[in-house]
Amino acid sequence: MAKGYWVSVYPAISDPGGLTAYDKLAGPAVRAGGGRVLSRGSRVVAHEAGITQRAVLVEFDSFEQAVAAYESEEYQKALVALPDGYERDFRIVEGTD
């Protein structure tokens, strides 16, 4: 079964400290959903049209598990805690076998 991944990039971060409330809720929600944070990179080397802002990669045992974790009540509460002024490119992608 192919793994699932959350890929999240923040093109605009107006206040880096503002993610604290989101992080406190999102971390436990991700772990409860079976996710493992592989990278919460502040060090990024960007190529082509890439950006050097924060990029986060979370791995799940399956694509379905990744979708379910995003749709969970716990993670939806974390999303509400994202402050204004944040632009986020978020995707759930299926890995290869």
Image (cartoon, rainbow, N blue to C red):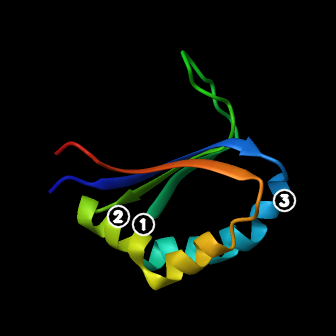
Circle 1 residue: 35
In the displayed structure, does residue 30 sit left or right of residue 88? left
Mark 1 and mark 2 lie on one chain; the one further toward the N terminus is: 1
Report the Cα–Cα distance between label 3 and label 1.
23 Å
Amino acid type at circle 2 is: Ala
Q: Residue at x 85, y 53 (%)?
A: 15
Image marks 3 and 1: residues in contact by CB distance under 8 Å: no
- Work out whether 9 lies above or below 79: above
Foreground disc of the pair 3, 1: 3
Q: How many marks?
A: 3
The mark found on residue 17 in the picture is: 3
23 vs 38, nearest the viewer: 23
Image marks 2 and 3: residues in contact by CB distance under 8 Å: no
Image marks 1 and 2: residues in contact by CB distance under 8 Å: yes
Mark 2 and mark 3 lie on one chain; the one further toward the N terminus is: 3
Circle 2 residue: 66
Residue 57, image x, y percentages: 49, 49
State whether residue 63 appears in this view. Answer: yes
In the displayed structure, does residue 95 sit left or right of residue 7? left
Foreground disc of the pair 1, 2: 2
State whether residue 62 appears in this view. Answer: no
Q: Quadrant of the N terminus?
A: bottom left
Mark 1: few/some/many CA within 10 Å (<14, 14-19, 20+) = many
Mark 3 and mark 1 lie on one chain; the one further toward the N terminus is: 3
Amino acid type at circle 1 is: Gly
